[in-house]
Image (cartoon, rainbow, N blue to C red):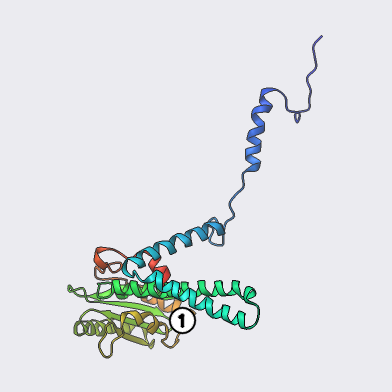
């Protein structure tokens, strides 16, 4: 007598069931990475923290090479800030209650000192190098449209064009005599396109009437806001017809034959 087969397809049996079960487990156990607003997979917070810690370590190593006193100055700042807070806690009769606050404030002061020293070290390395002004301008926070090397000479004098809320900012670096002539030519070239938009001109240097490299970013960001965001976008579309760089300007200063690292830029922006 022939045996009847079970018609229940959901009941697994034999080797087929054994082979299919792990596959199903893998399919159902696999999680899709969540996408952000830009459509790219989101990065976990732990991975972000690891990346930031790696960049801070790299920036510290590079700064320490040019500033051997850095750890001692950071330690002095930490101890001084923590001691002040702890002294207040002792006077109020709660030294242990103020201890965590003292530690946190000491770490904060040490990090501020580190950021300032790293920024100063970066500026000392790039000062006097071709492309230093462009490096500073491209690192500014906010909506700034920077076009590096819109005019220049064979002696590596250069004019960089910045579009932002103040209007048009022309920044020249190199020989002041040659640079001022380049800025005047660039003003005439863009005057037909920008109309009544304010045009500022800056020459980078340490002489009278010039802006030092370390103060360039602050000087530009403090200019008056003459345009709205919509007007900046409209002006950017009109100026796109002028094109970008017309001379081979380095993508960034090369202090000692090396290009600045990304970590030093990020520390400087903080």
Mark 1 Cα-neighbour bin, 10 Å: few <14, some 14–19, many ≥20: some
From this viewpoint, which residue is outermost toward the top?
1
In this picture, residue 154 sits left or right of residue 187: left
Q: Give the image quarter of residue 158.
A: bottom left
**Foreground: 227 or 105?**
105
**Quadrant the N terminus occupies:** top right
Q: Give the image quarter of residue 254.
A: bottom left
Position in image of residue 236 (x %, y %): 40, 76
In this picture, residue 153 sits left or right of residue 27: left
**Foreground: 203 or 38?**
203
Position above or below: 60 against 93: above
Q: Residue at x 56, y 75 (%)?
A: 102
From this viewpoint, which residue is outermost toward the left?
154
Position in image of residue 41 (x %, y %): 54, 55
Q: Give the image quarter of residue 35.
A: bottom right
Judged from the image, the secondary structure of the residue bearing numbered disc 1 is helix
Position above or below: 87 against 100: below
Residue 12 in view:
yes
Q: Residue at x 38, y 67 (%)?
A: 264
In this picture, residue 24 sits left or right of residue 146: right
Position in image of residue 241 (x %, y %): 34, 73
- Residue tagged 1: 231
From this viewpoint, which residue is outermost toward the bottom?
208
Q: How many marks?
A: 1
Position in image of residue 144 (x %, y %): 41, 76
Q: Residue at x 75, y 31 (%)?
A: 10
**Quadrant the C terminus occupies:** bottom left
Residue 149 in view:
no
Position above or below: 31 against 162: above
């Amino acid at each position: 007598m022939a045996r009847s087969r079970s018609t229940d397809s959901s009941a697994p049996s034999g080797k087929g069931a054994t082979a299919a079960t792990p596959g199903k487990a893998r399919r159902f156990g696999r999680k899709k990475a969540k996408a952000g607003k830009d459509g790219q997979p989101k990065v976990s917070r732990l991975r972000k923290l690891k990346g930031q810690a790696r960049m801070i370590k790299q920036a510290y190593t590079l700064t320490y090479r040019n500033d051997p006193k850095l750890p001692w100055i950071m330690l002095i700042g930490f101890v001084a800030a923590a001691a002040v807070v702890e002294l207040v806690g002792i006077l109020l009769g709660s030294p242990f209650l103020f201890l965590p606050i003292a530690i946190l404030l000491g770490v904060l002061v040490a990090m501020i000192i580190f950021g300032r020293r790293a920024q100063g070290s970066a500026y000392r390395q790039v000062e006097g190098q071709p492309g230093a002004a462009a490096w500073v301008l491209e690192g500014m926070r906010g909506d700034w449209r920077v076009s590096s090397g819109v005019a220049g000479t064979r002696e590596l004098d250069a004019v960089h064009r910045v579009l932002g809320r103040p209007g048009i900012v022309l920044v020249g670096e190199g020989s002041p005599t040659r640079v001022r002539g380049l800025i005047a030519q660039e003003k005439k070239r863009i005057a037909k396109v920008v109309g009544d938009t304010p045009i500022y001109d800056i020459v980078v240097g340490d002489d009278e009437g010039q802006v030092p490299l370390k103060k360039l970013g602050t000087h530009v960001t403090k200019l008056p806001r003459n345009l709205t965001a919509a007007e900046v976008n409209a002006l950017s579309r009109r100026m796109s017809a002028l094109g970008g760089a017309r001379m081979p300007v380095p993508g960034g200063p090369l202090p000692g034959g090396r290009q600045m690292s990304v970590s030093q830029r990020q520390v400087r922006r903080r």
